[in-house]
Image (tube, rainbow, N blue to C red):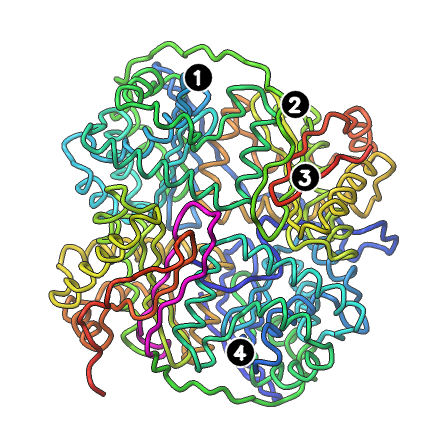
Amino acid sequence: MHFHQTQLPNGLQVIAELNPKAQSTAAGFFVRTGSRDETPEVSGVSHFLEHMAFKGDERYTADDINRIFDELGARYNASTSEEVTLFYAAVLPEYLPQTFELLATLITPSLRQDDFDLEKKVILEEIGMYEDLPGFTAYDHVMQQHFSGHPLGNSILGTTESISALTAEQMRLYHADRYKAGNIILAVAGNTTWENVTQLAEEHCGDWPAGDPPRDTTEAAPKGAQFCVPRPSIQQQHVMQLGPAPPSASPLRFAADLLSVIVGDDSGSRLYWDIVDPGYAEAAELSYNDYDGSGTWATYVCSRPEDIRDNLDRVGVIYEEVNRHGVTEEELKQAQNKVSARIVLQSERPMGRLASLGGNWLYRGEYRTVEDDLNVVRSLTTADIRELLNRYPLRQLTTVGVGPLEKLDAPAENSSTPPAT
Amino acid sequence: MPEHGPGRRPVPLPGWSGSHRRPARVAPNLTDSMPEQNILAEQLPNGLTLIMEPMSEVRSAAFSLLVPAGSIYEPTGFNGTASILTDLITRGAGDRNSRELSSALDNLGIQRSESVGWNFITFSAASVAENVIPGLKIYADIIRDPLLPQEQFPAAMSSAEQSLLAIEDDPQRKVLVELRRRCYDAPWNRPVDGTLSELEAVTPANARSHYKTNFRPNGTILGVAGHIDPDRVREAVQELFGDWSTAPAPEVTRVPRKAAETHLAADSAQTHIGLAFDAVPYRHEDYYAAWAAVSILSGGSSSRLFTEVREKRGLCYSVYASLNSLLEEARILAYAGTTVERAQETLDVMLAEIRKLKDGIDDSELFRCKARAKSALIMQQESTAARASAIARDWFHLGRVQTLDEIHGKLDRLTVTDILDYVRSHPVDDITLLAVGPEPLQLPD
């Protein structure tokens, strides 16, 4: 493995972790923009724009893009989150140059009116599809409630109303503002040479406009809320709860990952043994999500509506216990083994390395090898977990339910309070 | 819960476009050699098959253990037995109780899952290579000496019931489960997770009996791939499974499917459309022609369904077709989700595209299909879990394992004529339709 990095004169950052023995090469453009960078008038524009990227530019039509990616046998897609829009492809090494050219085309789309009008229908269908997925609906709403008044509360998809009202001109302005070279990272992993990477970057990205648009990353100060989305015709009650956790730049994030595995992994965790294993709920999980400047403990519980209150109480008891007494050496050891194996398995594919490569650079401007990650996971102690819990105890601060219940009657939050700052 | 927000499209990648006449930008199959493979297959005297694929460039290893105890072996009226057994079987084995078992696997970093299929209950596991033999030892306990604790039966039952309720809440999954019920004969049409109305009939005795009858070495397939020493794996498998006694394979009686309603009412935002029609199974000589036909319909973003339904008309976000193969029969299953008022048009366009295949296929479409397949085959070599599962599945369907080179060769030799011959000799006339949503739909003539 060899790591390389450079910056083009326009500000585009280029990083690569190269492995001549890999079977494939993965490349991705990480654009530092997402729903948190939107104003209410253009809610959903980042995600809609991600779709429009595939409609081509002056040189390539939408059909061309779809066709050529397939001719290259590329495995490619894009995703939009609260704060990153990612365009990526994995391909056999010999096809990297053409694949790269197309990927770069995605960053500078023409945004033609007729394409915009047609794709708007697809976005509205996508909103409909997610409406039929109660777990996703709960996620969307709990983010809005928890981060109310903070940009992280903005919906990724937007609403039927905001998307219907959005104009191509508004999207063009947003694109011109956010898709500047200084706001984009190109990451490459797998089998190619550094010379190839820099040459392709200069050729296809060198003329992108410079600029580094700002983002407000003030840590959120959520006050908590309860909210219900009644769905009388569905069977199960889905609940998501959020509480504050370390932001992405925090050194506590590794401990937070391990703690979420110990407490809320989908098997062998405390939530699993106390709630899922006895059959009280179909799912009870805790995950740690980190963002630019903020973070969340995210609890997800899905059970029969009549059991949901008891299940949320059970979660509260577990969190209270963990907040007070921390975790055991044995639990920590087990989580370290689990997480280490996950890191190794994920890193075997260039595509698996890409996310971690780009994410580390985007959030922290750092490169970490697989060994670096394994070492830090193995070195954590129960004292590190204690320090994390003192700063960010597990909380069920904001609660959203989706299901037959009109009112959740969620229990009062456990008494752990965040430390005075 | 979603780590990332929505992408451009769901996986599996749907996809196509009309006939582009412009020259291909990539020469087909410049370098045609697939990565080198060494696949070893052998059978223990008791009938258990061990297949190994050593891979030197990886740090991990994975196995896929297929036990012939899938839902087709459930007694009629007790659908869900295999699912409950699968839950119960990891709740303690050998001298370990449920928690000790889970901890032992976690300490080895074993990423694992158990799943019920029609033919098999599958145990999949992956970890750093040195932990895979110790992992196999624990799995030998699970397979051969499970506690199946009676007192945990209600918990397993409750989990199974809630999984079924979750499917009720997810119309995208619901339509596929119910489509299958309508397009295959019993018992291959059973939902692998069970049926709510039959679940409550299942008792601890049923689960135990399902275990006793069906957990046997003859018919069990173990695929192991990754950074392994084949001699050590072989030795371990002989030690762990060598003295496992053979048992007779139960009979499965085919019962013709009954006609059923083509609409299931649901208070959903979208209408979820499912279509099914006959195809040829994996072992059939025309399989790759059938596979290519499906790929032209739905492989990649330039495929016909993606282009005509989504890209040109904006009718949906998700539309795809896939080839589902049993041992001796197969179906093409197609799906689209769309708002109520556009559902009939979506169905009409999907069917028109499916039927249009016989009118002609462009060379460029076959070219793209081959390019995607080649790349997917090579990239499979980057995942030990994918290889472990592929070699075990090949053995079940073919009684041998195809190398990537062999599969690539078959694909490479395919011509447009082969695919057209296949499509024309398998006209799409017996179509199963199912719509889950507020309104019913009509099959066009």
| A409 inside magenta stretch | no
Instruction: Using the rendered view, name the quadrant where residue A365 is placed.
Output: bottom left
**Badge count:** 4
**Relative to residue A41, is residue B189 depicted above or below?**
above
Q: Earlier in the sequence, mark 1 or mark 2?
A: 1
**Residue pointed to by mark 2:** B284
Residue range highlighted in magenta: A223-249
Quadrant in which the C terminus of chain A appears: bottom left
Residue drawn at x 36%, y 18% as measured from the top left: B214
Q: Amino acid at mark 2?
A: His
Give the CA distance from mark 4 to mark 1: 56 Å
**Label 4: chain?**
A
Front-most of residues A233 and A210: A233
Residue drawn at x 66%, y 51% as measured from the top left: B338
For mark 2, give the secondary structure: loop
Question: In this rendering, which labeled residue sits more in front, label 4 or label 3?
Answer: 3
- The answer to whether residue A133 shows anywhere in this view is yes
Q: Amino acid at mark 1?
A: Thr
Q: Residue B197 at x, y = what percent? A: 42, 28
Front-most of residues B31 and B324: B324
Instruction: Using the rendered view, name the quadrant where residue B171 is placed.
Output: top right
**Residue pointed to by mark 4:** A32
Q: Are marks 1 and 2 on the same chain?
A: yes
Q: Residue B207 at x, y = what percent? A: 30, 23
**Residue pointed to by mark 3:** B440
Q: Residue A36 at x, y = what percent? A: 50, 78
Q: Residue B290 at x, y = what percent? A: 71, 32
- Apparent side of residue B326 relative to residue A219 in the rendered image (left or right): right
